Amino acid sequence: MNAAPPPIPSLIPETAPFSPEQRAWLNGFFAGLVSLDGAGVTALSPEQNAALMPGGAGDGDDGEAPWHDQTLPMPERMALAEGRPLRRRMMAAMAQQDCGQCGYNCNDYADRIFDRSEERLNLCVPGGKETARMLKSLYDEMDKAPVAANIPAEVKSATAPQPAADAGRSRDNPATATFVKRYRLNKPGSEKETWHLDFDLSAAKLDYVVGDAFGLFPKNDPALADAIVKALGVSSGYAIGDEALRDILIEKVALSPAPDSLFQLFSYITGGERRQKAKALASGEDPDGDAATLDVLATLEKFAGVTPDPEAFIEALEPLQPRLYSISSSPKVEPGLLSLTVDTVRYPVGGRTRLGVASTYLADRIAPGDPIQVYVQKAHAFALPADPSMPVIMVGPGTGIAPFRAFLHERMATSAPGRNWLFFGHQRRDCDFFYEDELNGMKASGVLTRLSLAWSRDGDQKFYVQDRMREVGRDLWSWLADGAHLYVCGDAKRMAKDVERALVDIVAQYGARSTDEAIAYVADLKKRGRYQQDVY
């Protein structure tokens, strides 16, 4: 009896863009061509398949990115990217905010890491440790996926290194601006601390447009640097190279959170149970339930008695990153001046007050006339409509009002005929109504068509901007039907998600649509640029 012929090996992956019949024919053709007879055959991986069929569906990149939603947690984003090319999974590891703090958008940052033109894996500030850890894990797969085979030519061209930008146009080449003044926006009785800040850009010869963000390089709290120097057991003048250790701690390195590399350093210089804890922390575990609260000083205190060499200690820390803020002014109102609206971050942990690096630098440590290193980050899909007659709806609670103050100033300065509707909210009207006189003046003059307010602590029940949106849902739907562009600025994890849920409900109720149809309508608004978000 004749033996059955061996099965035709599967050389063409299921992801290749062929019908079953075409795939079967190609499998047989290639098997016969090289006389493989099925022995030792391994199906092509998505990355290897990309080498044969670059671009498009050949590398699994159909242009869609279902994970590109800043409200999705990391596990969900990675699950959505499962089976996609490595560079796309790297994109899914980003925070999905396209905020520009890394110097790119999420997609381009991933591509630049993948083609090895960007070696830094810690630039995604919103993603923090979670993104850095995932990128490191994915980066370890790089040797399995040759660069030339994985990035289609058109992507390589789009992400190729660009000529150095002029000073002040990127984080890698900042310009020098001058701090002018600040004043507090909250009145007595507020639980918050929010500042309006002005900067002079004239000497830096920087310009910007509304919707852009302002990057600045802060400095750490000198008192925190002094505490770290003391914990290391050296003098404040201790030198590393040509620089004093204290100066490096203030100006060059991040002091919160403690990086994995610092835990790794401690695992090398201690032993026993503490070594095991340091190793666990370095791998992202939380052996004592305190990992989320460990900044650099707290880590030194946790491993007290084990003192690293100061030079090795500095090498284990991450560089101090710039911070981005939404611009709250228009250059058409006061050229050369740029304004920010910033919440100050202070909170107690274990008997010590932790400080937001940039926010307390701006609130406490920078003085009028001081120079500061800055850059303008161009907006990524966050701008006023090209047609000034289009109505705009702006939802910006708290400091989320910043870009909308800029939008309103711009519309006022250009005499734009389009209607303007602002939703603003905070805790208490009496002490947290930012720019109250200014907004009321705009309303009286007709620049601000509608002003809808929500105060979460003034009543028996908390009331937010999304609740106010639902109350006026019929009118909001009417504006959308008239072509209004909708903008949201603020917290990505809660507020933005709640606002979008309210918007879907409004579209379903007043637009006579099912929930699925309302979701599709909102998605279409995003696709057409009529629903834009500046969230963080």
Image (cartoon, rainbow, N blue to C red):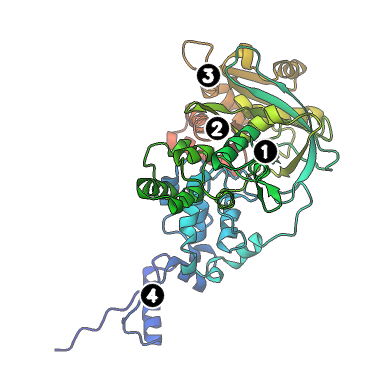
The one nearer the camera, 497 or 484, is: 497
Foreground tag (2 vs 1) = 1
Mark 4 or mark 1, which has the lower sequence index?
4
* Label 4–label 3 contact, CB within 8 A: no
Left or right of 277 in this view: 248: right
- Identify which amino acid the numbered label 3 is placed on: Glu
Mark 2 or mark 3, which has the lower sequence index?
3
| Residue at mark 2 to residue at mark 3: CA–CA distance | 22 Å
Q: Residue furthest right?
A: 203
> What is the crowding at mark 4: few (fewer than 14 residues within 10 Å), some, or many (at least 20)?
many
Describe the element under mark 3 as helix, strand or loop. Answer: helix
Q: Is residue 61 visible?
A: no
Instruction: Determine which quarter of the picture holds residue 413.
Output: top right
Q: How many marks?
A: 4
| Residue at mark 2 to residue at mark 4: CA–CA distance | 47 Å
> What is the crowding at mark 1: few (fewer than 14 residues within 10 Å), some, or many (at least 20)?
many
Foreground tag (2 vs 4) = 2
- Identify which amino acid the numbered label 1 is placed on: Lys
Q: Which mark is residue 491?
A: 2
| Residue at mark 1 to residue at mark 3: CA–CA distance | 44 Å
Which residue bears the numbered disc 3? Answer: 471
* Label 2–label 1 contact, CB within 8 A: no
Q: Which mark is residue 405?
A: none
Which residue bears the numbered disc 4? Answer: 11
| Residue at mark 4 to residue at mark 3: CA–CA distance | 59 Å
> What is the crowding at mark 2: few (fewer than 14 residues within 10 Å), some, or many (at least 20)?
some
State the quadrant of the N terminus: bottom left
Describe the element under mark 2 as helix, strand or loop. Answer: loop
Q: Residue furthest left?
A: 1
x and y percent of residue 204 in the render? Answer: 83, 42
